[in-house]
């Protein structure tokens, strides 16, 4: 099976700005006014009206609820028919954020009841008081709940995985799901991620992973979830599915410098892009659109644009560059999925919407998206020097 | 739509490369190296004791297998990196040092022929394990101090993968996996496939975890999953015994170096064993329970056998997930019996959790390492703490003492909360 036989047939997404594929494309076209970190928070989002089976929400955290809402939306968008695929040939690949302290909220009452006269919590008293908490208290704090409940929702019993690899998580989910499909082990994969980290990042004032590196500010972290469906083209067409894009190839790499350090020479990112291009047998001149892995950190963003300059130095006309995080915020473990799922909308539109144009040297990149160069390159870059690249092809219907 | 489309006929499984293991390191309750740990396994040691990390005197379950007298090795750490290490990540640092050293990847013995772009890290990491102090500091304040923010960084699960990548000079990519108790089984499986299908030549893999904290002790107790044999900790973890009453916390880390066979041979690395097959499924049933017919683990074991081109009778030993809970052991043994036959004498079974406790996200890596060492030494780990074998478990256990056995392949099962099931097959080199 060649890589282009794998297609994207649906997207389910929940962010602070929109819910669903169409609403997100409207959002990216029109932009939104954001005035504070609260604008990227889904703390007040209520998943109840979005999740197909609300029983799952009884033992879920807020992040899980957001993820399940996105997975429910994906089921509708991909017109999923559970009878079409054999359950053991359906796999779910997720990226999930590490749990937040509030995910242990089932213990709050017991904790407060365990304070002594000085206000300190006594472990000994907590040992008794905690016995009256809800039996499912532990489950709220598990980091693979979306994988679990997603598998129930989709009856997905095939190969699966869950990545806690920060901003690369959702890309790794797609990369590994696609590899499984290429090896013939899956017919349908659900891949993506979810995150609700804004509260923690706000309390920390800084992005915690950058502290040792001395950064004063980081990206605007956003809550959200986004998943896509990957199917084989022939099967997707046979079941009357709409094809949003083709998955072509992917790669990932790292600087190997340890936490919170990245190499300003950009060689690992360069290698990552070149490997993905090589695996796809795609020439840089065929790339019409790049989705930036923009971290919001000036040095890392500068390195990324320099690397893109090296990769596309030989191209007669520069590719277009889009940065969806300018509207969506940094979606962390959920990041990058809307880029893959909405690529055809970008190509159909023909220009990068002003709201997602990054502030870079305009001579290096274009705003015009040429249909003659139908491939798009989507990047993720982490402050710990980890990089991923997924190449997709727009399907212009 | 009537029935499923016949898509399997489209499959053309690509050829696989051979994957071998050239380094193993471990920090466990049995000892601070893989050799000491294996010695503890062979001798049937059960070092469980009352929980020391916090005052557990009023908790329903008060015992654990704990790593004692541990000190972090700073030989391979860079200044400031320890700020990113939670306790179990510290275990992983020492285990990685041992594995990399054994594999000849450190210092002057490091092979210059290895392309850094072909080296990856894939690690299974547990959940952050907060104590109450941390909880008060992190949850309640509006803003955090720098020190408190660093404490936040300590619990990010991908930091240890990043540090191991730096230690080994990996530039081929990093992934951190979390699927509860199946985490490191899954990490090893993905590492195996990465090499087998040509994406990497060498992957440092493994797992680390410690859930011995007030929150998890309370949480698991509420689920009724922990043993209440507080007065007899050494016999509390008793997988497949009729009177088992729950699992006992363990903690630790296990790191393995997986390598493409020719790559290992060319550099003259010591080959400890082979990774032959991997199976991964989802039960899609309940978050904490296996399906009563054991379907998920059955399919994972069959997938691993198919992947390795082996018959069930080729497997001489199974290291079961065997948590010592009533439900897991009964259903897992049912699954084993369906694949390997009831009470099979060809395939003997044990759960080493009677000697290590349940090391959660580290369990898959540690127990696969035990399979490799069992093959290497041609010795079956003992089934300890069995006072009355549960004959509803349709398996044949290994003997109460370690026994010699001539066998070529072993299988390690992992089953996670959330429904992920993995099966990994180890092979003896020179078989």
Image (cartoon, coloured by chain):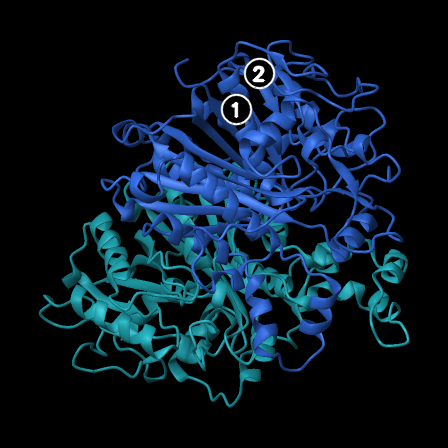
Whether residue B8 is situated above or below residue B84 in the rendered picture: above
| Residue A357 location (% of width, % of height) | 31, 81
Residue A347 in view here? no
Q: Quadrant of residue B228?
A: top right
Neighbor class of circle 2 (other Cα within 10 Å; few <14, some 14-19, many 20+) is some
Whether residue B357 is situated above or below residue A106 in the rendered picture: above
Along the horizontal axis of the image, is A184 left or right of A200? left
Q: Are marks 1 and 2 in contact (CB under 8 Å)?
A: yes
Residue A290 in view here? yes
Question: What residue would you read off at disc 1?
Answer: B373
Q: Which chain is depicted cyan?
A: A
Q: Residue at x 73, y 33 (%)?
A: B328
The residue marked by circle 2 belongs to what chain? B
Neighbor class of circle 1 (other Cα within 10 Å; few <14, some 14-19, many 20+) is many
Question: What residue would you read off at disc 2?
Answer: B379
Q: Which element carries disc 1, helix, strand or loop? A: helix
Q: Quadrant of residue B268?
A: top left
Q: Which chain is depicted blue?
A: B
Discs 1 and 2 carry the same chain letter: yes
The residue marked by circle 1 belongs to what chain? B
- Seen from the viewer's position, the closer of residues A126 and A54 is A126
Which quarter shows the C terminus of chain A? bottom left
Q: Which element carries disc 2, helix, strand or loop? A: strand
Q: Earlier in the sequence, mark 1 or mark 2?
A: 1
Tell me how far mark 1 sits from mark 2, CA to CA: 8 Å
């Amino acid at each position: 099976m060649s890589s282009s036989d794998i297609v994207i047939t649906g997207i389910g997404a929940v962010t602070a700005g929109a819910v669903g594929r169409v609403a997100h494309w409207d959002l990216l076209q029109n932009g939104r006014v954001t005035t504070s970190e609260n604008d990227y928070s889904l703390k007040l989002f209520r998943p109840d009206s979005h999740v197909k089976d609300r029983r799952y929400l009884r033992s879920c955290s807020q992040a899980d609820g957001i993820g399940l809402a996105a997975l429910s939306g994906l089921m509708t968008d991909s017109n999923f028919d559970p009878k079409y695929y054999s359950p053991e040939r359906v796999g779910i690949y997720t990226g999930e954020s590490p749990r937040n302290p509030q995910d242990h909220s089932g213990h709050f009452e017991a904790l407060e009841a365990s304070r002594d006269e000085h206000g300190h919590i006594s472990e000994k008293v907590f040992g008794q008081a905690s016995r009256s908490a809800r039996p499912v208290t532990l489950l709220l704090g598990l980091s693979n709940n979306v994988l679990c409940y997603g598998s129930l929702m989709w009856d997905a019993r095939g190969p699966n995985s869950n990545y806690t690899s920060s901003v690369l998580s959702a890309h790794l989910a797609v990369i590994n799901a696609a590899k499984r499909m290429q090896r013939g082990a899956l017919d349908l994969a659900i891949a993506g991620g979810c995150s609700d980290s804004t509260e923690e990042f706000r309390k920390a004032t800084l992005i915690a992973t950058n502290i040792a590196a001395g950064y004063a500010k980081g990206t605007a972290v956003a809550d959200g979830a986004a998943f896509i469906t990957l199917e084989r083209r022939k099967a997707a067409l046979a079941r009357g599915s709409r094809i949003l894009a083709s998955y072509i190839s992917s790669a990932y790499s790292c600087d190997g410098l340890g936490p919170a350090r990245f190499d300003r020479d950009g060689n690992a990112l360069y290698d990552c892009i070149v490997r993905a291009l090589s695996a796809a047998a795609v020439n840089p001149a065929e790339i019409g659109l790049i989705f930036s892995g923009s971290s919001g950190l000036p040095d890392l963003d500068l390195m990324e644009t320099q690397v893109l300059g090296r990769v596309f130095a030989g191209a007669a006309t520069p590719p277009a560059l889009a940065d969806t995080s300018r509207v969506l915020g940094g979606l962390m473990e959920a990041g990058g999925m809307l880029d893959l799922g909405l690529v055809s909308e970008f190509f159909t539109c023909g220009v990068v919407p002003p709201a997602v144009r990054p502030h870079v040297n305009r001579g290096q990149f274009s705003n015009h998206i040429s249909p003659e160069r139908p491939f798009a390159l989507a990047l993720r870059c982490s402050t710990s020097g980890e990089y991923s690249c997924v190449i997709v092809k727009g399907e212009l219907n | 739509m009537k029935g499923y489309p016949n898509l399997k006929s489209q499959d053309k499984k690509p050829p696989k490369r051979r994957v071998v293991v050239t380094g193993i390191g471990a920090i466990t309750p049995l000892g601070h190296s893989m050799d000491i740990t294996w010695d503890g396994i062979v001798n049937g040691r059960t070092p469980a004791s009352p929980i020391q990390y916090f005052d557990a005197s009023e908790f329903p379950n008060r015992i654990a297998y704990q790593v004692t007298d541990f000190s972090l090795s700073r030989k391979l750490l860079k200044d400031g990196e320890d700020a990113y290490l939670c306790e179990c990540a510290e275990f992983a640092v020492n285990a990685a040092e041992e594995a990399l050293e054994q594999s000849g990847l450190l210092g002057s013995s490091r092979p210059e022929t290895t392309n850094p772009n072909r080296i990856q890290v894939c690690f299974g990491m547990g959940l952050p394990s907060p104590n109450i102090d941390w909880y008060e500091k992190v949850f309640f304040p509006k803003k955090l101090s720098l020190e408190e923010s660093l404490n936040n960084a300590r619990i990010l699960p991908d930091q240890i993968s990043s540090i191991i990548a730096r230690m080994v000079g990996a530039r081929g990519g990093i992934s951190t996996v979390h699927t509860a108790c199946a985490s490191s089984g899954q990490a090893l499986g993905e590492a195996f496939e990465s090499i087998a299908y040509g994406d990497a030549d060498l992957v440092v893999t493994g797992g680390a975890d410690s859930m011995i904290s007030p929150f998890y002790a309370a949480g698991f107790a509420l689920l009724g999953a922990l043993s209440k044999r507080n007065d007899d900790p050494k016999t509390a973890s008793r997988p497949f015994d009729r009177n088992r009453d729950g699992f006992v916390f363990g903690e630790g880390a296990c790191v393995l170096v997986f390598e493409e066979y020719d790559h290992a041979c060319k550099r003259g690395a010591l080959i400890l064993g082979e990774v032959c097959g991997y199976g991964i499924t989802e039960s899609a049933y309940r978050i904490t329970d296996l399906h009563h017919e054991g379907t998920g683990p059955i399919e994972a074991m069959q997938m691993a056998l198919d992947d390795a081109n082996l018959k069930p009778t080729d497997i001489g030993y199974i290291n079961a997930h065997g948590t010592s809970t009533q439900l897991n052991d009964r259903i897992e043994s049912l699954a084993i019996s369906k694949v390997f036959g009831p009470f099979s004498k060809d395939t003997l079974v044990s759960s080493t959790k009677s000697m290590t406790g349940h090391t959660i996200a580290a369990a898959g890596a540690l127990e696969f390492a035990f399979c490799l060492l069992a093959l290497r030494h041609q010795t079956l780990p003992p089934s300890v703490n069995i006072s009355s074998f549960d004959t509803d478990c349709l398996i044949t256990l290994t003997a109460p003492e370690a026994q010699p056995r001539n066998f070529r392949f072993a299988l390690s099962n992992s089953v996670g909360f959330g429904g992920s099931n993995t099966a990994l097959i180890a092979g003896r080199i020179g078989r």
